[in-house]
Structure formats: structure tokens, C-alpha cells
């Protein structure tokens, strides 16, 4: 969550599709089953990808970055000329062979199907829950992802837009321009803060507590003491749902004060005692 360069690699390079024990979920990469099934947490994912390609040259290249997003999202559907219906961007293979293949299978599409193929071929290596989740994922992913990719391309001022709060490529490109180049923002916390966490947080959630403090320090805006907390993406960072289901609601009250959660996102500030140590 702090090293954006490594995060970009996790969204553009395939993980090893294997498992060392039934609790090992590393074959999902930087995703969770909830992200894949519900198709949530993609704003941060796509913005990170856009920033990586937009600043690959000295001058930000917006149109090339839009093509990179299209390639990553591509599906091997019937080719259509109308942007309102087209979701196959196989023509971008020559420019982005790492993101889309010659048939139009984009990185995300291939990743989801690679996961399902691995679980199907080696069910003894994964948990029963993972098998059930894959069954759910396979049933509706292609159609739902196709709908989402079409919505990604709706112009930001389109008068015919249906629904509210939809995510568009235009939104992603604007965020990428504002946030700039990918950075490695990781750093070591002062000893006083580490001691506070050690005394007030269970060992099992200490790593997540340190991450939240660091993330707050790096991302705090000048005009507010609240920082947006991408809960879904932090779950993916830790490789399971422990952060949102166990650590955050039960074990981190001495570290952060947070607003109610909605759609996998919340806002938080640090506990006053921690602020005094900064």
C-alpha cells in the first residue's frame, strides 16, 4: 500500500498459480475473491496502472494510457466498431503484449481464468471455501466484466448515463494526472510509535496497525485530519479478509478513529495519543 511501484507490478505481472497449504491464497495475487466476484476496489487498481503507464515517458501521455487501460480490461468478445459496445481491444497487442493477447484477452480476464483453472485442476491444494468462491466467480464473471468495461468508456459528461457513481476511464486518467508518478513511500516509524503499538495492539494485528499509521502520515491532506481508507485493497495487500473482518472492527480502536464504512471505503484519523507522538 506504500510501495506503489511494487503494487503496479502486482497488477501487471501474473503471480505463481500454486498454493503451499490450504490457507495460502497467494495465487490470487493482489486481489481477494470479494474483489473479483463483486468487482470492487478497482478504482485504486486502475489508477495505479494508469500512473505506471502515463509517466513511463517524460511527458504524460493520456491517450496511450487510455489504451493501456483498455488493453488491461479487454475481453475476447465479438469485435465491434462502436465504443458503446466494444470490449475487445486485441489490436493493442503490438503495443501492450504484457496486458492483452492476440485474441483480446486482457490481463484481468486472464488472471481470473488462470485462478479458476488452477483451483479446478488442483482442488486438493486449496480450501473448500476457495473452490466454492471459484464456482461463484466462474458463473457470472465474463458477462459482468463486459458490462463494466462498457461503462468504463462512457464519456464523463454523457447525458445518457444510467446509474450513479459509475467508474470511468476519464475519472482514472484525471486521478492519475493529479497523483503523478508512482512512488515508494515506505519508511520506518519512530520508536515511540512502535512502542505504543506494541503495548496497545495484539501481535496478530500489529502489522496492520503500523501500516495504517504510515498510510495516514503519507496520505494526509493539508486541509483535513481524515484520510480515505481503501479497506478492500488493504485486504488484498494482506492476502485475506482478516483486516476488514477481524482486525479493523475489533483490534485497532487504540490506533485509529474511523468513520462508518461504505462500499469498501472509509475515512480515518489517528488516535489522539498517537498524534502526540508524531
Image: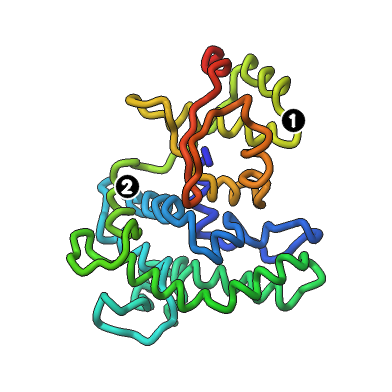
Quarter occupied by residue 231? top right
Side of 162 relative to 8 (left or right)? left
The residue labelled by disc 2 is: 175
In the rendering, at what x and y percent does residue 217 appear?
A: 48, 26
Front residue of this view, candidates 250 and 65: 250
- Residue position marked by numbered label 1 in the rendering: 202
> Which is more N-terminal, label 1 or label 2?
2
Residue 267 image label: none
Q: In the image, is residue 5 above or below residue 37?
A: above
Residue 185 left/right relative to 238 = left
The answer to whether 274 is drawn above or below residue 152 in the figure is above
- Residue at 75% of width from left, 62% of height from top? 19
- Residue 12 appears anywhere in the view: yes
Viewer can see residue 4: no
Instruction: Tell me: 158 left or right of 96.
Output: left
Q: Distance between the Cα atoms at labels 2 and 1?
A: 36 Å
Amino acid at each position: 500500500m506504500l510501495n506503489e511501484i511494487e503494487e503496479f507490478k502486482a497488477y501487471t505481472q501474473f503471480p505463481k498459480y500454486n498454493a503451499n497449504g490450504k490457507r495460502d491464497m497467494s495465487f490470487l495475487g493482489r486481489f481477494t475473491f470479494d474483489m473479483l466476484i463483486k468487482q470492487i476496489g478497482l478504482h485504486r487498481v486502475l489508477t495505479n496502472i494508469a500512473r505506471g503507464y502515463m509517466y513511463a515517458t517524460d511527458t504524460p501521455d493520456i491517450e496511450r494510457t487510455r489504451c493501456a487501460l483498455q488493453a488491461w480490461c479487454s475481453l475476447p468478445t465479438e469485435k465491434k466498431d462502436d465504443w458503446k459496445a466494444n470490449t475487445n481491444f486485441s489490436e493493442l497487442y503490438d503495443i501492450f503484449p504484457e496486458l492483452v493477447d492476440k485474441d483480446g484477452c486482457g490481463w484481468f480476464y486472464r488472471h481470473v481464468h488462470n485462478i479458476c483453472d488452477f483451483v479446478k485442476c488442483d482442488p486438493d491444494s486449496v480450501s473448500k471455501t476457495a473452490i466454492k468462491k471459484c464456482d461463484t466467480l466462474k458463473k457470472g464473471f465474463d458477462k459482468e466484466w463486459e458490462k463494466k468495461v462498457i461503462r468504463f468508456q462512457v464519456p464523463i459528461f454523457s447525458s445518457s448515463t444510467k446509474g450513479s457513481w459509475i467508474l470511468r476511464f476519464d475519472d482514472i486518467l484525471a486521478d492519475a494526472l493529479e497523483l503523478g508518478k508512482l512512488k515508494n513511500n515506505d519508511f520506518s516509524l519512530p520508536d515511540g510509535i512502535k512502542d505504543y503499538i506494541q503495548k496497545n495492539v495484539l501481535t496478530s494485528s500489529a502489522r496492520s496497525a503500523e501500516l495504517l499509521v504510515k498510510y495516514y502520515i503519507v496520505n494526509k491532506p493539508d486541509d483535513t485530519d481524515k484520510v480515505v481508507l481503501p479497506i478492500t485493497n488493504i485486504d488484498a495487500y494482506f492476502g485475506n479478509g482478516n483486516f476488514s473482518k477481524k482486525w479493523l472492527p475489533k483490534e485497532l480502536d487504540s490506533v485509529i478513529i474511523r468513520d462508518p464504512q461504505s462500499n469498501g471505503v472509509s475515512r480515518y484519523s489517528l488516535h489522539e495519543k498517537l498524534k502526540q507522538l508524531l
